Image (spheres, rainbow, N blue to C red):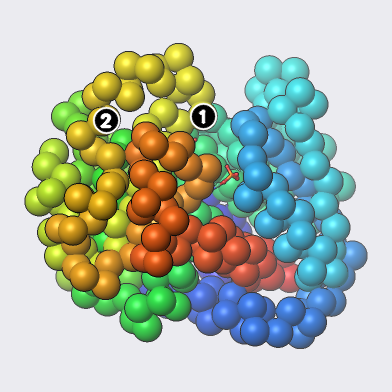
Amino acid sequence: MKAKDFLTVRDLSQEEILETFRIALDMKADRMKYSEALKGKALALIFEKPSLRTRTTFDIGIQQLGGYSLYLSPAEISLGKRESVYDVAKNLERMVQGIMIRTFGHQIVVDMAEHSSVPIINGLTDYSHPCQAMADYLTMHEVKGNLKGLKLTYVGDGNNVAHSLMFAGARLGVNVSVACPPGFEPNVIAYQQACEDAKATGARIEITHDPVAGVAGADAVYTDVWASMGQEAEAEQRKKIFRPYQVNEELMKHAKKDAIFMHCLPAHRGDEVTDAVIDSAASVVFQEAENRLHAQKAIMYQLMR
Ligand code: CP
Ligand code: NVA
């Protein structure tokens, strides 16, 4: 990996993403093979939002590589409030060999990366969730056997997860369709960047307001919560707006027969997805969750060695 940090999927070339998948699958096949790869190295985990998967997989992942982690809770640091982002970076770079951050504004991880000499890994911002997209395409690759030319349809809010799926799809040659209500499209710049990146691979990146049209011919149907962390106050209003975008058995009928169902989790069952879909044979949501571990270990291994 050429980049010092992993802030968005766009930091990686197609070759670097595929190399990360190769290492991740090698780690998945033989956990002990890498048990001393990051021996004695410390990873700080800064969380300003809750987490199950990200916390567990980074914490366990660094230990499986021979290192150890330090969890810093939302109450402890208050990036930019208790202390400037610059000062946090200048302190931590003397104490740890890598920093994972889950926070609100994307600029915070950008600033941390600029000021810190040790790698910064984005564990979710309001703008992107790159570790998630790596685990998701790794999963799609495992299940489908290949990626190029496949179609992934993301149904729901044009949020951080949607952005990262577009970025990675563009790099990998996966066609990505985002079906969202008017006014909830992905960020315009993110969409333009994905379209620009897609020119190199021929991937089609499209936005539609029609979930049925979006899902047509899809190899994977993906959804996420309608109100992300930090948008709790809008949750009730969003429920009404997003109702026609629920992924249910009726909508899945419009995808390919062998289409898989994907979700980053946590899921709000009965809202963005029904039990019948998330618990169906087509659902790979727990495989995605497990693959967070393998994908992130491969990223830490490359950045922190
Ligand atoms: N998908 C995901 O990032 O899960 P957590 O919010 O539980 O970390
Ligand atoms: N879009 C969701 C993803 C959670 C993993 C959020 O930001 O809350």
Which amino acid, mark 2? Phe
Tell me where residue 13 sits by quadrant: bottom left
Q: Nearer the viewer, residue 289 or 147?
A: 289
Asked if the residues shown at circle 2 and circle 1 are in contact, with their CB atoms under 8 angstroms apart, the answer is no
Outermost residue, front side = 276
Q: At 29% from the left edge and 46% from the top edge, which residue is drawn?
A: 247
In the depicted structure, whether residue 160 falls above or below residue 194 = above
Q: Quadrant of the N terminus?
A: bottom right
Picture coordinates of residue 207, whole percent (x, y): 17, 45
Q: Earlier along the polypeptide chain: callout 2 or callout 1?
A: 1
Decide if ligand 2 comes within 8 Å of the CB at mark 1.
Answer: yes
Q: From the viewer's perspective, is the residue at label 2 or at label 1 nearer?
A: 2
**Dot 2: within a 10 Å radius of its alpha carbon, few (fewer than 14), some, or many (20 or more) residues?**
many
Q: Which mark is residue 242?
A: 2
In the depicted structure, whether residue 288 falls above or below residue 31 = above
Picture coordinates of residue 93, whole percent (x, y): 78, 46
In the depicted structure, whether residue 170 falls above or below residue 239 = below
Q: At 35% from the left edge and 59% from the top edge, which residue is drawn?
A: 261
Picture coordinates of residue 112, whole percent (x, y): 63, 39
Q: Quadrant of the C terminus?
A: bottom right
Q: Disc 2 on helix, strand or loop? A: helix
Q: At 59% from the left edge and 75% from the top edge, which residue is drawn?
A: 24
- Badge count: 2
Q: At 15% from the left edge and 58% from the top edge, which residue is drawn?
A: 254
